Image: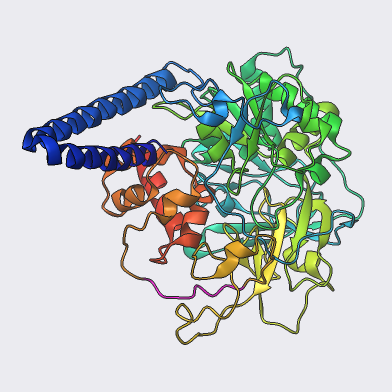
């Protein structure tokens, strides 16, 4: 934004001084032209120095922990801030962030919030590959044929044996699936009709932090806590500077967090109390501040936390974007992130002594006969959840998650433990002759070649076609237009591809996760797999740290 201001001032100054110098040179000779050019040079130098000073002030202020976003900490305050801005009344005295960069992808197939049913899955799985940072072959604590209760440990990481990974349901272990190099991919449990839970002795909230952490590791809850940087399972030995929770998801067809927390308000509040005991810093709650958005009182009136309201297009709901605007990750900082459903699970664990990772999942997409919500448990079988509701007449792709960050699955696969959405879209295995030159078919895009901007409320029927092949990695400025963070994603990607560790770290790689660059990948003219590249960079940087 400051760059655009500077360019505007320079252009206006050039026009003004060139006009003045031309008029005066007609009557007073060439000296006035020289003085005008000299004056222009002085103006530009002063402006450049002021911009440099402003940037240095903000960098130093961030190091000292000053909230530069909400305190209008700048030599060049915005007009909106001077006039009081457009802060919604419901925000009250909470910080409010208006994000302009990003893009909303409106798709057909949104789940009906008035239609939530109990899931019919009978098989569930614990999946080691979904947990970033775990060894590929963990140590199994069960065998095929064993009976387990919900909350019983199933395996542990050999590199950190204190962290247990527990069964989401009770039943019989019917299969242990393995992949390449005998790596365990799934431990499958056939669920009992009547669920039985392992009962844990819950420590009091007045217990020391070490006791609380040990309890969370032993109960199986700990793998639900991620840490930034690197977006991997948190290290129990490292206390977080702050804890962040985003209470809304701005991704396409995402599940409504208000429905997820409905009926679980007390458990959510209990979970927040526990999190406050696990950090010497603050628990930050990112809340949906967009116009017309409904917000549950469990979020808007949450106590013991710092509430922050975010307004703007996707990815405003990403916890990484919220961290960047609330309290950016600096060198050696460690913060934790959790999802709303995980906080509810934590609240139930401390309220009843049961590890019960229940999930509310939005079943979405144009190939679903009746898009709706399903109440189930973590790791449910996808095919069983979709049974009888999938349109078999079309060739479709099933996605565990949303269309930007989800993974392609089959009916025999299982949900990730953190999943709250299943999306089914048309397979895009077709070719268009000069499709990009002849914009005759509506499609989600930020390109002005298609008149999408004239129909902001139009919903698209998506497919998986990339509408082009992989091309040269060129600088376009598209990434920066959809990522509301003060980083340079294209430069970061090139630093990763050239293994330039110092450069990728200095450019802000540690602040990012795959979901943060998903829109960049969507807009990418070069069709680069940016999420995969980013994960490679994060893994390399973590190994070096």
**Measured from the top left, where is residue 114 in percent x and y?**
89, 54
Q: Is residue 219 left or right of residue 237?
A: right
* Farthest right residue in view: 194
For the residue pair 118 and 207, the one nearer the viewer reads as: 118
- The dominant secondary structure in magenta is loop
Examine the rendering and report whether any part of residue 344 can be seen.
yes
Place of residue 311 in the rendered image (x, y in percent of width and height, measured from the top left): 64, 39
Residue 120: quadrant of the picture: bottom right
Going 29% across and 27% down the picture, which residue do you hit?
52
Instruction: Please state which of residues 231 and 150 is positioned toward the viewer in this rendering.
Output: 231
**Residue at point 83%, 60% (across, down):** 372
Residue 119: image location, x then y, percent: 85, 58
Q: Would you place residue 104 above or below residue 285 in this image?
A: below
Q: Residue at x 55, y 24 (%)?
A: 82
| Residue range of the region highlighted in magenta in the rendering | 463-470
* Front-lying residue, 254 or 184: 254
The colour scheme applied to this rendered structure is: rainbow
Residue 514 as seen in the image, left or right of residue 32: right
């Amino acid at each position: 934004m400051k760059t655009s201001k500077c360019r505007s001032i320079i252009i206006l100054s050039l026009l003004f001084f060139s006009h003045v110098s031309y008029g005066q040179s007609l009557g007073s000779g060439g000296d006035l032209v020289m003085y005008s050019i000299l004056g222009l040079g002085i103006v530009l130098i002063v402006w450049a120095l002021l911009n440099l000073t402003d940037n240095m002030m903000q960098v130093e202020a961030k190091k000292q922990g000053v909230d530069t976003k909400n305190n209008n900490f700048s030599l060049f305050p915005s007009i909106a801030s001077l006039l009081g801005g457009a802060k919604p009344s419901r925000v009250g005295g909470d910080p409010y962030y208006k994000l302009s960069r990003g893009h909303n992808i409106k798709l057909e197939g949104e789940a009906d919030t008035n239609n939530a049913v109990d899931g019919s899955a009978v098989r569930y799985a614990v999946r080691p590959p979904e947990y970033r940072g775990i060894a590929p072959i963990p140590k199994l604590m069960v065998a095929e044929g064993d009976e387990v209760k919900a909350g019983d440990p199933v395996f542990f990481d050999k590199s950190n044996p204190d962290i247990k990974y527990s069964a989401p349901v009770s039943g019989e272990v019917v299969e242990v699936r393995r992949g390449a190099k005998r790596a365990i991919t799934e431990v499958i449990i056939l669920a009992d009709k009547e669920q039985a839970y392992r009962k844990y002795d819950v420590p009091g909230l007045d217990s020391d932090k070490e006791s609380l952490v040990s309890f969370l590791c032993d109960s199986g809850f700990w793998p639900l806590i991620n840490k930034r940087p690197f977006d991997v399972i948190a290290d129990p030995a490292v206390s977080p500077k702050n804890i962040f929770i985003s209470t809304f998801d701005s991704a396409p067809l995402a599940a409504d967090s208000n429905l997820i927390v409905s009926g679980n308000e007390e458990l959510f509040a209990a979970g927040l109390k526990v999190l406050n005991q696990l950090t010497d810093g603050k628990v930050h709650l990112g809340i949906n501040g967009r116009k017309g958005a409904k917000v549950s009182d469990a979020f808007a009136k949450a106590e013991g936390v710092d509430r922050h309201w975010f307004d703007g297009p996707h990815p405003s709901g990403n916890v990484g974007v919220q961290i960047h605007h609330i309290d950016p990750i600096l060198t050696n900082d460690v913060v934790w992130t959790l999802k709303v459903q995980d906080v509810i699970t934590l609240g139930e664990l401390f309220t009843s002594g049961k590890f019960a990772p229940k999930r509310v999942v939005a079943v979405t997409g144009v190939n679903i006969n009746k898009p709706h919500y399903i109440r189930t448990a973590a790791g449910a079988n996808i095919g069983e959840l979709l049974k009888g509701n999938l349109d078999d007449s079309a060739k479709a792709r099933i996605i565990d998650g949303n269309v930007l960050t989800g993974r392609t699955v089959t009916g025999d696969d299982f949900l990730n433990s953190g999943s709250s959405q299943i999306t089914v879209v048309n397979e895009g295995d077709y070719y268009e002759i000069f499709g990009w030159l002849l914009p005759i078919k509506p499609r989600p895009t930020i390109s002005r070649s298609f008149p999408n901007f004239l129909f902001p409320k139009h919903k698209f029927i998506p497919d998986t076609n990339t509408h082009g092949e992989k091309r040269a990695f060129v600088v376009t400025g598209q990434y920066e237009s959809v990522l509301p963070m003060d980083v340079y994603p294209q430069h970061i990607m090139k630093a990763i591809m050239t293994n330039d560790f110092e450069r990728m770290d200095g450019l802000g790689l540690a602040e990012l996760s795959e979901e943060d660059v998903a829109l960049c990948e969507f807009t990418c003219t070069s069709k680069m797999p940016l999420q995969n590249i980013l994960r490679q960079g994060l893994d390399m940087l973590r190994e070096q740290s």
